[in-house]
Image (cartoon, rainbow, N blue to C red):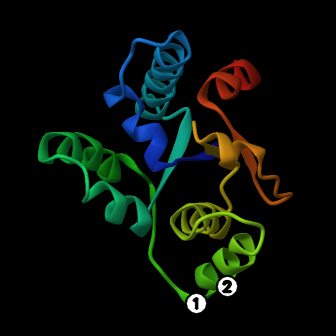
Amino acid sequence: MKKIYLDNCSFNRPYDSQNHLLVKIETIAKFNIQDAIRNREYILVWSFILDYENSFNTPDKAENILKWRDIALTNVKYNDIIFLIAKEIMLKGISEADALHLASAIYAETDYFITVDKKLLKYKDKRIMIINPINFIERVK
């Protein structure tokens, strides 16, 4: 079974304005992915950095997103290896928080890192496939 990591941008996508068609389609794709996780088609990976970033959401939004931590079969805790991987990623222009997301997913040997962040989608790493929710659905279905 494939392991997937949804970053904070992905979890927050349904709360973004749905006035743009792309945002609406990404939201639908993200919901489809979540349904597949619930059906145990994929293993969800959670991390400490998701907890941290989610803590800045409004209480209702944070509570809804936090439910996914209980569904995740892997919960990555901060450690020195993640720090070193993140440091390497930051050298390529990725922000600290995004680098910690990627490093957590890489550390957990995740197959797919799902994001709607355009900068992250441009970043390439042979250890993990970084992909938009729409492209993920196209690739696996």
Is 60 displayed left or right of 114 in the figure? left
Image vertical order of residue 47 relative to residue 29, above or below: below
Disc on res. 138: none
Image vertical order of residue 82 relative to residue 120, above or below: below
- Seen from this angle, which residue lies furthest right? 126
Nearer the observer, 17 or 87: 17
Neighbour tally class for label 2: few under 14, some 14-19, many 20 plus, Cα within 10 Å: few
Q: Amino acid at mark 1?
A: Asp
Count of marks, rendered view: 2
Residue at label 1? 80
Image location (x, y in percent) of residue 61: 21, 40
Is 137 displayed left or right of 62 in the figure? right
Mark 1 vs 2: CB contact within 8 A: yes
Q: Who's the residue at 60% across and 79% down the image?
A: 82
Is 48 displayed left or right of 40 in the figure? left
Q: Who's the residue at 44% across and 76% down the image?
A: 77
Image vertical order of residue 42 relative to residue 98, above or below: above
Disc on res. 84: 2
